[in-house]
């Protein structure tokens, strides 16, 4: 198992745990909005720096 696959798995696990935590706290809508905003921002930055 390489470092990259281990890191990818850990990020995946952290994202799942964050989703579970949001469900527990009743903050799912806020989390979905923030994840969508982050994804759009990341893609826009990628286009700028390309």
Image: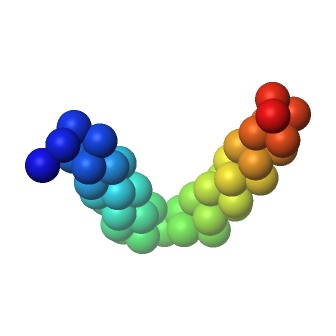
| Scheme by which the image is coloured | rainbow
Q: Is residue 35 left or right of residue 11?
A: right
Q: In this view, does 15 lie to the left or right of 9?
A: right
**Residue 32, image quadrant:** bottom right
**Residue 16, image quadrant:** bottom left
List x then y, in percent, for residue 33: 69, 60
Is 34 situated above or below 20?
above
Can residue 30 be seen at all in this image of the molecule?
A: no
Task: Residue at 76%, 39% (x, y): give it.
Answer: 46
Q: Which of 16 and 29 is in front in this view?
A: 16
Is 2 situated above or below 15?
above
Q: Which of 5 and 17 is in front in this view?
A: 5
List x then y, in percent, for residue 12: 35, 57
Q: In this view, does 8 lie to the left or right of 38?
A: left
Q: Residue furthest left?
A: 1
Q: Quadrant of the C terminus?
A: top right
Task: Residue at 68%, 53% (x, y): give it.
Answer: 39
Number of numbered tags placed on the structure image: 0
Q: Is residue 36 left or right of residue 16?
A: right
Task: Residue at 71%, 43% (x, y): give it.
Answer: 42
Q: Residue furthest top?
A: 49
Is 12 situated above or below 2?
below
**Residue 31, image quadrant:** bottom right
Can residue 32 be seen at all in this image of the molecule?
A: yes
């Amino acid at each position: 198992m390489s470092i990259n696959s281990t890191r990818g798995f850990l990020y995946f696990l952290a994202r799942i745990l964050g989703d579970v935590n949001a469900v527990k706290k009743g903050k799912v809508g806020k989390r979905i909005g923030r994840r969508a905003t982050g994804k759009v921002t990341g893609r826009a930055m990628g286009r700028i720096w390309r």
